[in-house]
Image: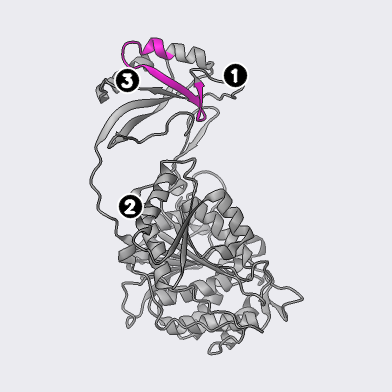
Amino acid sequence: MATLPAVSDQALPSSPLAPALVPTIAIAHGDGIGPEIMDAALRVLEDAGAKFQAVPIAVGEEVYRAGQSSGISDEAWDVLAGADALFKGPITTPLGSGYKSLNVTLRKTLGLFANVRPCRSLAPSVSTLHPELDIVIVRENEEDLYAGIEHRQTHDVYQCLKLVSRPGCERIVRHAFEYAKANGRKKVTCFTKSNIMKLTDGLFHQVFAEIGEQYPEIEQDHMIIDIASARLAARPQDFDVIVTSNLYGDIVSDIAAELTGSVGLGASANIGQRLSMFEAIHGSAPDIAGQGIANPSGLILAGAMMLTHLGQGKPAARIHNAWLRTIEDGLHPGDIYRESLSKACLGTEAFTDAVIERLGSTPQTFAPVDYRDAARTSVETSQAAAPRERAQRKLEGIDVFVMSDADPETLACDLQVATAGLLPLQMITNRGVKVWPKGNPATFYTDHWRCRFQPQSHLSLNKTMIVELQRRLAAAGIDFIKTEQLYSFDGEAGYSLGQGQ
């Protein structure tokens, strides 16, 4: 049987902790299957010789139900303030409004800007249609639609804000290139939708191109997210390192993990400058909780990633090699069990025992891993943002969002009467499609209108005029719900033009 290359996917950004010190690890057991697989992972770490001080913290469903909407208590924040890493089981966020995602809260509050998810097939031991899959997805963790800023603006229309910053783009893109460089990866591909979201995704694409110039030894490519996702599912061997924004990264990393055979095999690192968080990528699976059948692999491998990050490469390698040997020997949890490939279907405890029994062993089909001298990406380098001169900003107009059941012509007439002699109405759009002037009668309307006011090109605009515009609209009974000021930066429009472009 052919020997497969080493699974060298755990080299992560270096921790500020010196390897000689015993790290403090905050342990969050999680919900659903979380406590079962966390107990399993901790057994493996301890038997492998990992050195750490474990401090349990209460997070998740129990804390939510106690009235804490973020799912984490003040006491847990105090522990995290002194911890070197967070080892977290999957969390259940209760259904209904008022509950915040704990994962999003942790990532944003702790500055865990980079989510690193290695995905590699384990053929022939684990069934997969893509035996050559070997991908690392580097996902931006703090921005994009996951800012969670949403509003109901009218009876019919809801809004979610997509926030993207240049510094956020710069550090995640640089992190991806540094990761590739440190781990011998040959190619970095950027996924965006910059052909439609020309400002937000356009910025991510632009920063990728700018920073990529500093890494000429690494092959670089950009793809639009829809065809990129299709290509990932059909030909994952075409990719090496993928860097993308928050929502896209969440989706494509689950796709890639499933292509390896099961999301139950996936581990994840959330990297910050001081503290980092390690977890399995799957959810809490409450439907199988307490049955002893959950696959602890994702959390076991996340534990190995954590140890590598903290400078304990030797026990990390013992764990990963023992896990590979267990998989190679055909001892499989139920989610990857196949009668034609597996020798036994093991529950959570039995699978964990099998991994522990193989500590010190190395796989025979898969090349063994070695993390003692693992190259690790510099977090400080990844955090650095290139200094830039401030652009010359000029106020050029205002978009007024109006709730109205009127047709476009009637609404335009009312707006023009109210603002006569102040600022001319340039256009009205409905859900991003221009409906005035010269709208198409086939266009479907809702009660949410974007009404753009801009002076003639030779005239200047100031905020006093904008306040007066709003005063006149209010006096005329125009129900405006939101305004957005339109700026140019160094003469380039900082706002979308035309029909949602």
Q: Position of residue 139 (x, y in %)?
A: 46, 58
How packed mark 3 is, by other alpha carbons closer than 10 Å (few <14, some 14-19, many 20 or more), is some
Q: Which amino acid does label 2 sit on?
A: Pro
Q: Which amino acid does label 1 sit on?
A: Pro
Q: Image point 49% across, 54% down: which residue?
A: 64
Q: Image point 53% across, 31% down: which residue?
A: 157
**Camera-nearest residue between 83 and 332:** 332
Q: Position of residue 282 (x, y in %)?
A: 57, 62
Mark closest to the chain's N terminus, 3 or 2: 2
Disc 2 target residue: 167
Disc 3 target residue: 455
The magenta span reads 415-435
Q: Which structural element holds mark 2? A: helix
Q: Position of residue 269 (x, y in %)?
A: 46, 66
Contact check, label 1 and label 2, Cβ < 8 Å: no
Disc 1 target residue: 441
Q: Which amino acid does label 3 sit on?
A: Pro
Q: 98 above or below 171?
A: above
Contact check, label 1 and label 3, Cβ < 8 Å: no
Mark closest to the chain's N terminus, 1 or 2: 2
Q: Where is residue 251 in the image (x, y as percent from the top left)?
A: 55, 54
Does the magenta-highlighted stretch encompass residue 419? yes
**Does 249 sit left or right of 468 as displayed?**
right
**Camera-nearest residue between 365 and 358:** 365
